[in-house]
Amino acid sequence: MRIRLQRFQAFDMLNYVVLAAVSLLCLVPIWHIAMVSISGEGPANQYIVGLIPIEFNLSSYANILRLDKFWDAFGVSGLRVVLGGLLNFLLTVMMAYPLSKESSYFKGRSVYVWALVFTMLFSGGLIPTYMIINELHLIDTIWALIIPGAVPVFNVILMVNFMRQLPKELEEASLVDGAPQWTIMTRIYVPLSLPVIATVTLFSVVGHWNSWFDGLIYMNQTENYPLQTYLHVVLASRNLVNADENSVMASLTNRSAISAQIILASLPILIVYPFLQRFFIHGIVMGSVKE
């Protein structure tokens, strides 16, 4: 008994050490970027800033907060998160609820599920997708960033598995009382599915906030860039600036200024995550278990 207890303690200690090491690997790059952002322009551009700021100053943040293009991109990303997250939530719930029913109740349920899984494994490709967006006249609109990913299939499957584990007696009792399916979904299933809804909402918000490639493809006007696309263009411009030694552009894209923009762009997710984290573990575990 004592030997088994010692083995468990050793295993726990190993887990703590491994998790601490993984956490450090995640935190150290963010901390380094934060320290560069509050360091002087000279040490930052000379790559001598480590985990402690050198020539501490906040001028990079002050300059970024006066930059109109940064706030334009911030606004586009904020609008994308609100509209995209809301559309993802509505379509995910409205697809997951009927698909959570038994095949005997919902004829053809398996066909719909396999059709969804097929789209998750195989896509139409970049060029056909661009041609469709162009034909729909969505180029340079916020909908070009939202509609292609309006139905996140992984989130639908996660929510279907969660709803299938809810007691069937709740639905049966509601049907006996004469409640229609819409009432059962909105008054019973949605409130009981809060953990998985919080989880898929977090996935959608983070996905929309961090996406940059679609903005680069579907947006021709720079003022329509979402924040991550804007940061990508700034980073690419910085490399080109170094090659051309253009001092004017270099002053606008110095390393401390770029680091400050990265930190400011990460803040919304860092603020939102702790409020959804308590639902995250329960939602992801319950939703990933298949009957």
Image (cartoon, helix red, strand yellow):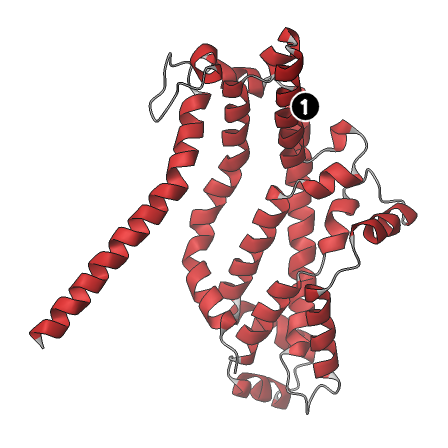
Q: Residue at x 37, y 36 (%)?
A: 28
Examine the rendered structure and indicate whether residue 117 appears above or below residue 247. below
- The residue beneath circle 1 is 69
Residue 130: x %, y % from top left = 83, 48
Q: Is 228 in front, or is 46?
A: 46
**10 Å crowding of disc 1: few (<14), some (14-19), many (20+):** some
Q: Residue at x 76, y 52 (%)?
A: 147
Residue 166: x %, y % from top left = 51, 79
Residue 25: x %, y % from top left = 38, 42
Q: Secondary structure at mark 1?
A: helix
Identity of the residue furthest to the front in this view: 243
Identity of the residue furthest to the right in this view: 135
Q: Image check: 167 left or right of 176?
A: left
Q: Residue at x 85, y 44 (%)?
A: 138
Q: Image check: 135 left or right of 280?
A: right
Q: Is 118 in front, or is 67?
A: 118
Residue 257: x %, y % from top left = 53, 19
Total numbered badges shown on the rendered structure:
1
Identity of the residue furthest to the left in this view: 2
Image-quadrant location for residue 110: bottom right
Q: Amino acid at mark 1?
A: Lys
Q: Is 284 in front, or is 268?
A: 284
Image-quadrant location for residue 253: top right
Q: Residue at x 62, y 79 (%)?
A: 100
Examine the rendered structure and indicate whether residue 80 appears above or below residue 195. above
User: Which quarter of the image is occupied by the N terminus?
Assistant: bottom left
Q: Image check: 116 left or right of 64?
A: right
Examine the rendered structure and indicate whether residue 34 appears above or below residue 66. below
